[in-house]
Image: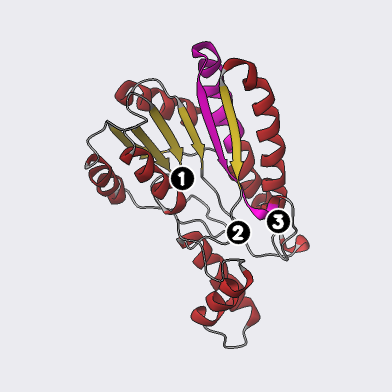
Amino acid sequence: MGVLAGKTALITGGLTGQGLAIAKALAADGANIAVGSYVGQAKGRLADSAAYPEAAEIASVRSELEDSGTMIFAGHLDVRDAQSVTDFIAAASARCGTIDILVNAAGTTAEQPVCGHTDALWEKIIDTNLTGAFRMTRELLPGMIVRKWGRIINIGSTAASVGWKDNPAYCASKAGLLGLTRCVALEGARHGVACVMISPTWVETELMRRNVEQVIAREGNGRTLEDAMADIAAQNPQGRIIQP
């Protein structure tokens, strides 16, 4: 029996990338799993780098996670929409039980200078990366406090403390997420609820690859994706790109 047997974890952005990798790890430790991502082509999609899974991927991910032998729920979740958040949590709880662990992994970015960000693009990134995490936390924190146990893990970035060229909205969202994390940690501490933020550097996901492709296209100097990825790996202390 895994160390998380009897617990239920909800992972936003859980159908792809880091979110899916985290879901697999928690399932392997015995947790029931609810994963949600924005499914299908985003309406009026802006020039962001998010990986939007298709509807067929829901069944595929569900089947893969069910190999762990725990209860699994997978579906569409738009963290920018308060009603979508409420509906997803209700459906996930009905299937898997009360949510004990929240992982806020949904995220997006766009390679644009400050003045290249339209209001709509800025708002989309902030609403996904920061306000979405707030909405999820606002829904689930009260129950965790009542039960005297809960874990909230926010997926941040080194961008929370170090500026990245042509990523102002992303950096602002992750800096804001760090502030939110600290406030939630203070509120939850007396009630057995812990809140932390994990801040990796570059992680090899579809989001990262799309982001790098945007940079290459804008540079227009013939650099290949492989060359760009090698340059990024050399910047990491490990000398490699982190895997999900």
User: Residue 182: x and y, percent?
Assistant: 69, 33
Within-10-Å neighbours for mark 2: few <14, some 14–19, many 20+:
some
Compute the Cα span from label 2 to label 1: 18 Å
Please give the residue where the numbered disc 2 appears in the rendered image.
Answer: 201
Left or right, 183 with respect to 18, comes to right
- Residue type pointed to by label 3: Thr
**SS class, disc 2:** loop
Q: Quadrant of residue 164?
A: bottom right
User: Residue 59: x and y, percent?
Assistant: 25, 45
**SS class, disc 1:** loop
Please give the residue where the numbered disc 1 appears in the rendered image.
Answer: 13
- How many numbered discs sit on the rendered protein? 3
Give the magenta part as a residue range.
132-159
Question: Quadrant where the C terminus lies?
Answer: bottom left
Chief SS of the magenta region: helix
Earlier along the polypeptide chain: callout 3 or callout 1?
1
Q: In the figure, 110 relative to 19: above or below?
A: below
Earlier along the polypeptide chain: callout 2 or callout 1?
1
* Residue at 62% from the left image edge and 66% from the top image edge: 237
* Residue at 63% from the left image edge and 77% from the top image edge: 218
Earlier along the polypeptide chain: callout 3 or callout 2?
3
